Amino acid sequence: MIRRPGGIAIQIALAALAVAGLAIAILAIGVVVVGGQSFADLMTEHGENTESSQRMFTDSVGWVVVGTSVVAIVVAVVVAATLGARLAMPLRQIGRAARQIAEGDYLARIARRGPEEIVSLSDSFNQMAAALEEQERIRREFIANAAHELRTPLTNLQGYLEALRDGVIEPDRATFESLLDESERLVRLSRSLDTLAAGDAGLASVPVDLDLAAVIRSAVDLARPASIAAGLALELDLPDRLRARGDPDQLAQVVGNLLQNAIRYTPAGGSVAVRVERRPGDVLVSVSNTGDGIPANDLPHVFERFYRVEKSRDRAHGGAGIGLAIVRQLVEAAGGAVGAESRDGVTRFWFSLPD
């Protein structure tokens, strides 16, 4: 890439100067050469000699051409420099803001000033800065929450092992079951993180044609014992066969995660419902449950990694806050979309897939 010397103001001034010089040269040639010859011919016809005619032309026209040329050049340079400076100012501001973001200050923004193209560039820059700021917020929360999720079972394991070593507790079956529960929690968390990392690396499977009804029916059958143990009614409404596109294993995980989430947060005596409907161009799958709803302020964030809704959906109910993030990642990898809504004591999570 060839870099031209000078700033944009200097380059615009030089370009304007070149254009003005070319125009003046053409004008001067026309006036001095063609006009001078015509003037000399006219003067000769009226009895003046050639030398006298040339001196009269130089005195009356030549100096006017030189003077106006100098004025034109000065005006062109001033106008070009002014215009270049006005264009360069917002670009310098964008450059400073870009350096701020590169140094980690994601609050840098650009004022919307200047020509339409500069304003459009400023809007794009501000949109990029806002996206980077949001990604940085999510990254910080992810690191903090991941550290917390790892710290809890590790602390419990450390406490149990130190107590066993010191003879504070007896190595009975209940103790070993507690140790096994904490280790299984770590394994589940690591597997969930592996799933998220695989999706971030673009390792998602290629969607294929499948019978979505069979996938959902199998996932519901696996979740039914847990719903019975929790004292919940599990309803299923879907056709015998339903063609869709996706990865069977990943879709089974999606439905399983949604069912697990619904069962976990439905109080005893409540119900969980799975419904499927075909729409023009896609298939809609929804998992609904009764119980305490999700506050409206939390709904836009429920699919974020490690995000937890306060009140009823807290850490006491279990889970690492990754299941819904995996749902979104797997569904979007299959070309679908996800969403959530909660009102009148019913919370509904849904996802759609192209048919």
Image (spheres, rainbow, N blue to C red):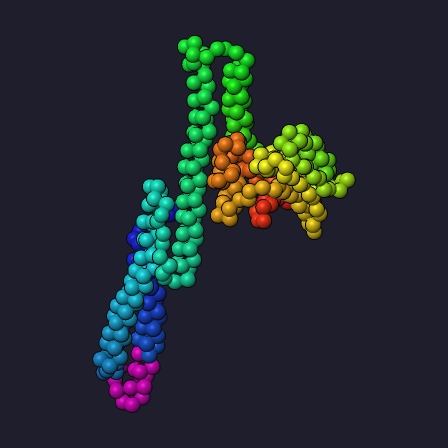
Q: Is residue 304 visible?
A: no
Q: Where, by quadrant of the figure, is residue 353 drawn?
A: top right
Quadrant position of residue 113 = bottom left
Left or right of residue 243, residue 17 in this image: left
Looking at the picture, tell me which residue is in the foreground, 111 or 319: 319
> Is 14 part of what is drawn in magenta?
no
Residue depicted at 54% across the width and 37% down the height: 325
Q: Residue visible at 34% across and 73% down?
A: 27
| Foreground of the two, 167 or 103 | 167
Q: Is residue 109 left or right of residue 348?
A: left
Seen as rendered, the residue at the extreme bottom is 46
Q: Position of residue 192 (x, y in %)?
A: 54, 30
Q: How far across and how far down the image is residue 218, in percent?
A: 70, 32
Could you tell whether 198 is left or right of 152 in the image? right
Query: What residue appears at the point 47 percent right and 24 percent down from the top-left corner?
Result: 153
The residue that appears at 64% across and 29% down in the rendered structure is: 229
Locate residue 166, reporting x and y percent. 41, 10
Say left or right for 73 vs 268. Answer: left
Q: Which residues are magenta?
A: 36-50
Identify the main secondary structure in magenta: helix
Above or below residue 226? Residue 177 is above
- The relative height of residue 128 versus residue 143 in the rendered view (above or below) is below
Q: Tell me if residue 163 can be seen.
A: yes
Q: Quadrant of residue 349?
A: top right
Q: Locate residue 72, reporting x and y percent.
A: 28, 71
